[in-house]
Amino acid sequence: MTATIVAQQIINGVVLGSLYVLVALGLTLIYGVLVQINFAHADFVTLGAFAAYFFMHLLGGSYLASIAVALLVGALLGVAINLAIFAPLRHKGSELLPLIATIGVSTMMQNAMLAVFGPVPYAFETPYSQRVFRVAGTFFTEQSVIIVLVSIATIALLYAFMKFTFLGKALRAVAQDRETAGLMGINPNYLIMLTIVLSSALAGMAGAMLAPVLVLTPFAGTSVIVKAFAIVIIGGFGNVEGTILAGLLVGLIESFTTQYLDPGLIDIVVFGLLLLMLVFRPTGLISERREENV
Amino acid sequence: MPHLSWHDCRVDIFVVTVGLGDKIAEEWEPLRKQRFILAVSALSLIATVAFSDANAQDKTIKIGALFPMSGPGAYFGAQDKQGVELALEQVNKEGVNGYKFTIQYEDSACAPLPASQAAKRLLDQYKPDVIIGEECSDATLAIMPIIAQAKVPLLNAGSSSIKITEPGNPYTFRILPDEVMQGVDLATQAYNKLNARTAVLLYENTNSGIGNAKVFKDTFEKLGGKIIADIGFGRDVNDFTAIATRVAGAGKADVIPTYTLEGQGLKITQALAQAGVTKGGGGSAIQLGTIWLPFGFEQKAGKAAEGYVRIVQFDPTDTRPVVKNFISAFKAKFNADPTHLNAHAYDQIMLIADAVKRGAKDAQSMRDTLAATKDFQGVTGSVEFNKHNQNIKMDTIHYMRTEPDLSWTALKWN
């Protein structure tokens, strides 16, 4: 019985951790390249969730296609936010202004979604969320399998993009030294746009993955974003590999704290770990120089 | 018609009289005397009409509403507002004792800090005669002292914490059964009617969640039942699979009393079914709930909700005329079936109108008249306040069971 429970909580932790990784990846990418924090990231996640929901329920699309729709909506939102906020404010040379602007965007988006979608929680059911597999005393839904597979695929694609493509290498160059990269013929503005679009697209997709799991309201993203920030810090600011490890770790901590301690203590344990990391290992789980994070 | 006050009217009459007096002194002629008297009479009449109109305009009961309109409890505010609007439309059609009712809403967000700020804003700027709200106990507990200090009555219909009325304060009234009334009854019915002997408690870590769970535990154990797991969690928990795993591993539970808002409630119900614990997932446990969840919950939760037994504050199968009229008026206005939130917001306004009918005209008389309420017939049940301003009527507790087709069966246990 105990072994079954442990196995079950490992499954639960990995699924939850995969979701956290999807949300945190966008945050860590934007920080790694631009050294900027996007406080509206949670709301991009929420909008992606609603995009997937309405694609399925109004247009009759499939869930798997709705993931692509949410990704696209996120990407378009990224283009709009960059053109309207990041690019103009970057030209003013202040790092604080875009940060404050993202807080404004977050509040604006939450209230706009509240006005449009209303406050009543939506039930986002997919054909996969109620199909339960029972294996050796453990259980998991088809939805959980999709979450883990999509997370693995996203991580692999992102990793391949960064390591093996010209654009990925150029992004890493901009992350290391924006000015020198510009002197080498790389257009930093184009790559900054690319980063924001990638990050927003990831947020949108994370929304489609999270929507069947979390309570879908205009404030849905905010309930996971604090954990995502914690994961980014625990993993090492802007470090992709660290973020993946930290996401899974936080998912497992949540599951085992729920089982053996108390779910009410989850935040104490997670944020206690965050404080310990900041004190004893401020560079994160995978230590490397910030310039080389992405 | 511009709004005139007593003071404005007196000044108008004075100016008219003085102006005419000067005219008399200068141009006194016997032939004009008759015309003058007519003119004065006409002006007096106009002034009287203007004055009585101003007086009628002044006969307004100002209602402040503190509802959550943002955050996880925002669905409360949206549905409360519908109930309020329907009731106001009805009572303002002809007025009550010459009084009309106006309302101002503030977003209290189901949390202590925004609720306190909203209450202060309402009291400072709107100066209401009575306030309705909040829904969440933590928020209600935070606004109670602020509103009591302003000596304005607060009429609550959605917060169940016992701390609201015990020891309470003279300005806070509650029409729904408190957590003790609900919890004692729920535990007793579970033990006697469902033959439950083991239970797992699931609740959010708030005053209300903890309080409700504790009352159930105390009563259930006193009756001879056993609590095999006691699990509280924060409002930020999204994925309940880990909690469902723990419940599944805790042993055979006959009932699972659950105290959460709608969103988390949905996820818990689905996770418990996926873990094979509850009837909806092929298990034997029956999930129990109180008035926290709105109508339509079962349709959202789907098959996982099968067998769920919960207290609702409003029984749509109730055949009393007041209920039938409310349902038809609500459907006509909103083209939807009313929820218990619509119903209790409607009752709050109707109780205020009833108090005005019994003589309430300002904050203090509203408080005194509300305190004297006996056998008010609302759509959620009847109302009679005890010395702590808690409604003592148990006919506001209605039990419903979710059937496999997701319809309800009224259990008529009370």
Image (spheres, rainbow, N blue to C red):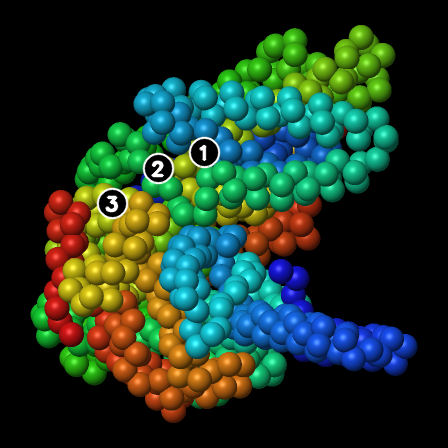
**Residue at 75% from the left image edge and 78% from the top image edge:** B33
Q: Secondary structure at mark 2?
A: loop
Return the x and y of residue A239 as percentages of the image width and height: 63, 32
Closer-to-camera residue (B216/A257): B216
Can marks 3 and 2 be said to lie on one chain? no
Count residues near mark 1 (Cα–Cα under 10 Å), then give few for <14, some for 14-19, many for 20+. Answer: many
Farthest residue, direction bottom: B387
> Can you identify the residue that label 3 sits on?
B299
In the image, residue B139 sits, relative to residue A184, either above or below, namely below
Q: Which of the two marks, 1 or 3, is nearer to us in this view?
A: 3
Label number found at residue A124:
2
Parent chain of label 2: A
Q: Secondary structure at mark 1?
A: helix
Q: Which of the two marks, 3 or 2, is nearer to us in this view?
A: 3
Label number found at residue A49:
1
In the image, residue B225 sits, relative to residue A238, either above or below, namely below
Indicate the amino acid at tag 3. Gln
Parent chain of label 1: A
Label number found at residue B145:
none
Return the x and y of residue B351 as percentages of the image width and height: 38, 74
Count residues near mark 3 (Cα–Cα under 10 Å), then give few for <14, some for 14-19, many for 20+. Answer: some
Task: Decide if residue B235 is on the left or right side of residue B231.
Answer: right
Task: Decide if residue B125 is on the left or right side of residue B59.
Answer: right
Name the quadrant containing residue B81.
Answer: bottom left
Indicate the amino acid at tag 1. Ala
Q: Are marks 1 and 2 in contact (CB under 8 Å)?
A: yes
